[in-house]
Amino acid sequence: MRFGWAWGQEAATARGVEGAAGAPALDWLHDGPRLHTATRMAGVEVHLLRLDPEAGTFHMEGRWLDSVEAREHLRHFGVAEEPTCWVLTGYAGGYASTVMGRRILFREVACVGMGDESCEFVGLPAEEWGLQAASDAPLWDLAPLCEEVEHALRRLRSEHGQLQHVLAVHEQLTHVVARGVGPAGIAEALGRLLGCGVAVDDRYLRPLARFGRIASLAELAERRPDLHRQLARLQRDRRALVLPACAGNLQSGNVPGPNLSVRNPPDRSLSGGDVPGQSLPGEAAGEPWGDRSDGLIVAPIILGEEMLGFLTMSAVRGLAIDLVALVAERAALTCGLELLRARCAVEGAIQARGDFVDHLLSSACDAGFLERWAHHLGLNLAGEPHRILVVEPVGRPVSMPQGRLAALHWRLHELLDAGGIRGLIVTRSDHLVGLVACTSPAASALADDLSEWAAAERQPVRVGVSREFQGAAEAAPAYQECRTLLAAMKKNGPAGQVVRVDNLGAMQLLLRAGPPETLRRHAAARLGSLMAYDRENQTELLPTLRVYLENACSLQTAAEQLNISVSGLKYRLQRIREVGGLDLDDPEVRFDAQVSLRLLSLTDWGAPADSDRSKGYSPSFPTVHKLATQT
C-alpha cells in the first residue's frame, strides 16, 4: 500500500495538480483512473464520483477490472481472507489525496483475491472511515525508516504490556473458577480488572448477570435486525463477535458500511490509550463504566454443541480489540464451566430428591435411615406432620405433554416459596408428587391454589391430598391411599378437582384395612352377582340399591330420586333380594352392602368394560366423591 501511495502521489504531482482546488480538481480526478489504467495493474471503472472541494467532501465508488494483484495472489497463495489489491488501493488514495489536498483513503469492499466476482472499492476522507482509518495509518505513513522503527518499538512495548495484563486477567479468571462464584462473580471480576462493562445473557438474550452500565444485547437486536443472524453464526464459528464503534456511522447513505465481523479486527486499541483498565473517554466523574452501544465484543458461551448464552464486554481503553476478544472468549469459557457446574448441582439435587421419594413411597429402606436422609434435604419427617400431594394433569397420559408437568412443577414450587412452606417436589412420568410440611398455615390452601391456577391456565388438574402423617413409615400408606382415591375420582368425578383423604371420615379405615385387591374381593363376594346381572341384562339393580340405602330405606324418597314409581322400586328391590341373595330387612346385611358399595367407589373394579359403556351402562358413586371433595 505504501508503494502504491507514493506512486499515486508522484503521478498526481507529475501532472502539476498538487494541492489543486476548485473546478479543475474534478477533471484531474477523472483523469486519475485513466492514468491508473495506463499502469497496466488493472482497468478502472468509476460508478460514482461526488466531491465538493470547498466543503471538503469526497465520495468515490467503482471497481478494478482484471487486477494483476488479485490474479497473482490466487495463482501463488489461493483465496485470501482479506483484500489483496494493496498497490491499487494505495495508488488511488495517494492520487486523490494529492488532488484534494487532504487525506483520502480507499478500501476494497470486495476482492477477486477473496473469491468475490469483482474488485470493488470505496474512497472517503480518512475521518469518515473511523476505526478502520487508524488501522491503515501505518501502511501509508511515509515517515523516515528510523521513525518507523521507533514507532514499531513503542508499539511492541505497548503490546507487551497489554499481553501481560491479559495474562494477569486470565490468571484471575482461573481463581474465580476455583471459587465457584457463578456468572455474576465472573462479570464483576472481569469488569473491575479491565474497567469495562460486562454482561452475561442466556441464549434468549435474557440477562443472567451484569456489571457496570453496558448496552443490552436485546436492545441492540431491536436496532440492528441483522444482529440475531450474526449471533446465530457464533455457535458455528465459536469466536468472538466485534461490533465496531463506527458501524452506526458508516451504515447510512450510499457508503457501504463494514459488516459485523467475527473476530478479525485490526491490531489496534479502540481509543489509542496506553494503560489498560482505565475509564473510557467521555465518562463522567464517579461513573467509571461507560454506557456505550458500540465498541462491544460478544463471545458465545458454548458447552459441547449447546449454545448457553453470550458474554458481552465494552471496549477497554489502551487494550487492542483482538486481545479484548481473547479475554471475552476465555471469560465465556469460564461462564460455561460455571453454568455446567450449576446444572450438575441442580440435576444432582433433583436426582437425590427423586431417589429419596422413590425409597420413601416404596418403604424400601429403614424408616430411621429415611428420616436422616430427609433431614439432609431440609425436612423433619420424624418431628413434624406432613402430607403428600399427588397432582395429575387431566388427559390421557399418551397425549400429555411433558411441558405441562414442568409448568405445574414450577408453579407448585413458587407456591411453596410464597407460603414459606417446607417441602420437595418430584416429577414422575404422568404426575407430580409433593411432600409438604403442615407447619405453615398456607399449607392447607396449597392444593386449592394450584388447582385454581391450573384452571385459569386452561390446563385443569386433579389433586389428591393425603391424610396427615408423621414419620417415614407412614408415608407409603398415605401415598397409596391418595392414589387409590384419585383413581376413584378419575372414574366418577369432574375433570378438575381437589380430593382429600381426610374428608372420607371412617372410609379412611377401609382404605387402610388392606391392599386394594383385598377390598375388591370383599366387594365382589357381596355384590358380584348384582354387577354381573346388570351387565348381562342392562339393568340398574346396583344403582337402585345404592340410592335406596343412602336414603335410609325410604321408598318414597328413593323412588323420586330414581324417577320411578314406588311399585317399580318395590319390584327392583325384590329382584335385588332374589339375584343378590340380600335380606334388606336385616340391618347387618344393609350395613355390609353399603360398605361394599363404597369400596366399589374407591376402586376401579366396578367400572364397566368398554363394551358396557357402549351400551349405556355407567354406574357411579357420588357419595364418596362428595365426601372427598368437600372442604
Image: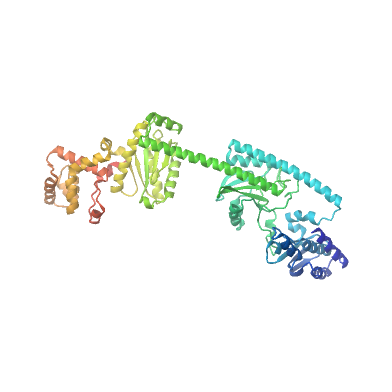
- For this orientation, the residue located farthest to the front is 76
Residue 73: image location, x then y, percent:
73, 61
Residue placed at 24% from the left, 44% from the top?
600
Q: Quadrant of residue 601?
A: top left
> Which one is nearer the viewer's eye here, 539 or 299?
299
Q: Quadrant of the C terminus?
A: top left
Residue placed at 79% from the left, 56% from the top?
139
Q: Quadrant of residue 104?
A: bottom right
> Quick check: can you spot residue 19?
no
Q: Position of 125 compared to 334: left or right?
A: right
Residue 604: image location, x then y, percent:
27, 46
Count of marks placed on residues:
0
> Which one is nearer the viewer's eye here, 498 or 169?
169
Q: Quadrant of residue 523?
A: top left
Q: Position of 462 compared to 38: left or right?
A: left
Residue 167: image location, x then y, percent:
69, 41
> Quick check: can you spot residue 415?
yes
Q: Position of 220 compared to 425: left or right?
A: right
Task: Give above or below for 397 relative to 62.
Answer: above
Q: Position of 56 compared to 551: left or right?
A: right
Residue placed at 29% from the left, 48% from the top?
491
Residue 287: image location, x then y, percent:
68, 43
> Which one is nearer the viewer's eye here, 393 or 416?
393
